[in-house]
Image: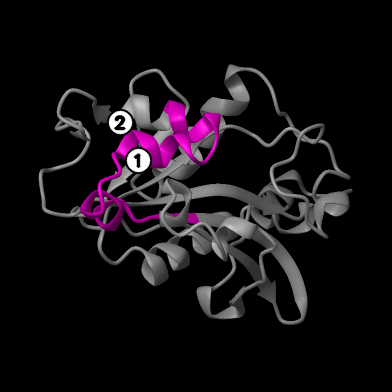
Amino acid sequence: MTDPTRMREAMTETFPAEQLSYRLTTTSLSEDLVGAGEPSSFVFHFPFEVREGDMIVARVHALAIRLAEAERVGFTAAEVFDSIDQELHEFYCAIYDQEGETFRGDLVDPTDLRDVLYIDSVKVIPSRRHKMVGLRAVERIREMLGGGCALLALKALPIDPENPKYSEAIDREVFGHPFPTRGEAAKAKLRDYWSRLGFARVDDTNFLVFDMSEDRPEF
């Protein structure tokens, strides 16, 4: 018989960070290449492959939102976030004091920093779930891209296989083993997962933020 305790231990086994590698992959999004002078030209897309040896175990898509530069040439934060999609418009409404066009003081300590690093999509293959691969990937991306950013953010909402964000080669494997995508329990589980990196929930929304001026927790 299989020992249930040993099964649980195997499911929560973590990968040492040094066993994972990260590769920035080519994006076909045209706004990365053209559109100078438009609000969207200040949003940079960074799609990453996460590998264990030669095997792709996860894909993460990050957005570096360069608000300081956009504002210097006359665009507002609202215009930049609205140029991305509805999700980022809702994010803007949740984290900004819209009268002053500044981050809410209860979410981010006041600094001169304006840029935002947003984790737009995290996909982990079934055999590497429950091993903190997603946490390690986002922590590494925070180290690589977070310089100059006031906050790191994401939306703690499971990706719906009927409407996955970004079509990627690993989608068939990721969605081949069903996982909860709806209901408060699934969202609460994700919030608890990301809280290990120091993320805090914004009011009663699905958005989580980490103030980059704070110390990063160990996990």
Q: Nearer the viewer, residue 153 or 6?
A: 153
Classify residue 33 by image quadrant: bottom right
Residue beneath the point at 69% across and 57% down: 10
- The label shown at residue 173 is none
Earlier along the polypeptide chain: callout 2 or callout 1? 2
Residue at the image position 51 percent from the left and 63 percent from the top: 136
Residue 70 part of the magenta segment = yes
Give the quarter of the image for residue 125.
bottom right
Q: Which residue is mark 2?
A: 95
Q: Is residue 56 magenta?
A: no
Question: Which amino acid type is shown beneath numbered disc 2?
Answer: Ile
**What element does badge 2 sit on?**
helix
Residue tagged by mark 1? 209
Compared with residue 57, is residue 214 higher up or lower down, i.e. above or below?
above
Specify start and end residues of the magenta stretch as a single range: 63-90
Total labels: the figure holds 2
Residue 42 position in % (x across, y down): 41, 55
User: Do tag 2 and tag 1 residues touch (Cβ < 8 Å)?
Assistant: yes
Front: mark 2 or 1? 2
* Element assignment for label 1: strand
Q: Is residue 202 left or right of residue 40?
A: left
Q: Is residue 186 visible?
A: yes
Residue 132 visible in image: no
Residue 216 higher or lower than 54, as above or below = above
Query: What crowding class fits label 1: few (fewer than 14 Cα within 10 Å), some (14-19), or many (20 or more)?
Result: many
Give the amino acid type for the residue marked by disc 1 in the picture.
Val
